[in-house]
Amino acid sequence: MTTQTLTETRTREEIAAHVRRTVLLEAEIAGSGHYGPSLSIVELLVALYYGFLRIDPADPDRLDRDRLVLSKGHACSALYAVLADLGFFDAAELRTYTRLGTAFGDHPDMKKVRGMDFSSGALGHGLSIAAGMALHARLRGDDARAVAIVGDGEQNEGQIWEAAGFAGANRLSNLLAIVDVNTVCVDGTTRDVLDYEPIGDKWAAFGWAVERIDGHDLDAIDQALTRFEQRRADGGAPTVIVADTVAGKGVPPIEGMAEWHIGYLGGKDLENAMRTVSQEEGNR
């Protein structure tokens, strides 16, 4: 199972730009969007889905597949864009995003969206689900991996740390957590709301191997994923990648701004954002 062939005619930077344009268009359809948290995870999703995760759009429910849990489910517009691009469903279906009767809500529903492994809503639950998936794979005796993408604001949730403690104590080497440290949450900056830095030290205290990287550097992400795979093969500790990112990445006027965790770019603002994303793609 692989998605690697889908990058043969496109660079991953081009795919990332496509995902960002799709996020902007989904927000236009909805009349608002979670720009900050969706745009900050684009490179992470591209690195995972285009060459790393063992999945099959033709057989999305295959038992021994890898699984990805988007715990910060409000960033689902980026994941929808990736799944559509991979062929899990017709991209034209995203034109119904958040409309009455659609399968594509502002949080994902795994019973309605092909390729989605977790239904989210209230934050903080995803790591527990992914730990259960990793343990299930171990008990089945296969080498499937479970990945959870959590927000830095989610570190405020006690259930995150219960799951981290369980995974560390049970040495779930096939479990990978990725913390999207975009420094913004719905109530403001994470520094001002509840500062959890140094995040890596806290995960290490629960028995996790810690990687800290630039979450927009595809090569750095690849290298961290390779090191995770080496630990998994050796039966070592679970791995957390603490990924430093920029909220709203790719749209400079809103980058890093807590006010744009959710909002609406319309008219000329949307045109300028789309143009900027396309220009960035051309400059790479």
Image: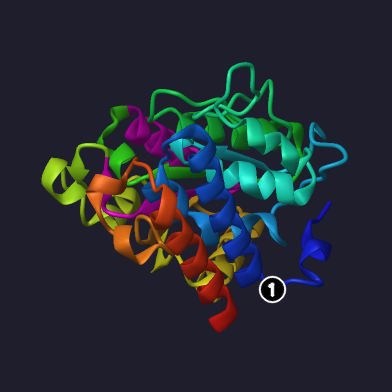
Residue 40 occupies which quadrant of the picture?
bottom left
Task: Give the residue displayed 34% in from the left and 53% down from the top.
Answer: 204
The quarter of the picture where residue 147 lies is top right
Q: Is residue 70 above or below residue 40?
A: above
Q: In which quarter of the view is residue 84 placed?
A: top right
Query: Does 84 sit left or right of 97 as displayed?
Result: right
Q: Position of residue 53 (x, y in %)?
A: 70, 52
Tell me residue 37's x, y (percent).
40, 47
* SS category of the residue bearing label 1: loop
Residue under label 1: 11
Q: Give the range drawn in magenta.
A: 159-185
- The answer, for residue 118, to whether it is visible in the render is yes
Q: Position of residue 32 (x, y in %)?
A: 41, 37
Relative image position of residue 257 (x, y in whole percent): 25, 54
Frontmost residue, 51 versus 199:
51
Name the kind of residue labelled 1 in the image.
Answer: Thr
Name which residue lies at 59% across and 17% down. Answer: 100
In the displayed orientation, state which residue is furthest to the front. 267
* The C terminus sits in image quarter: bottom right
Residue 209 visible in this rendered orientation of the protein: no
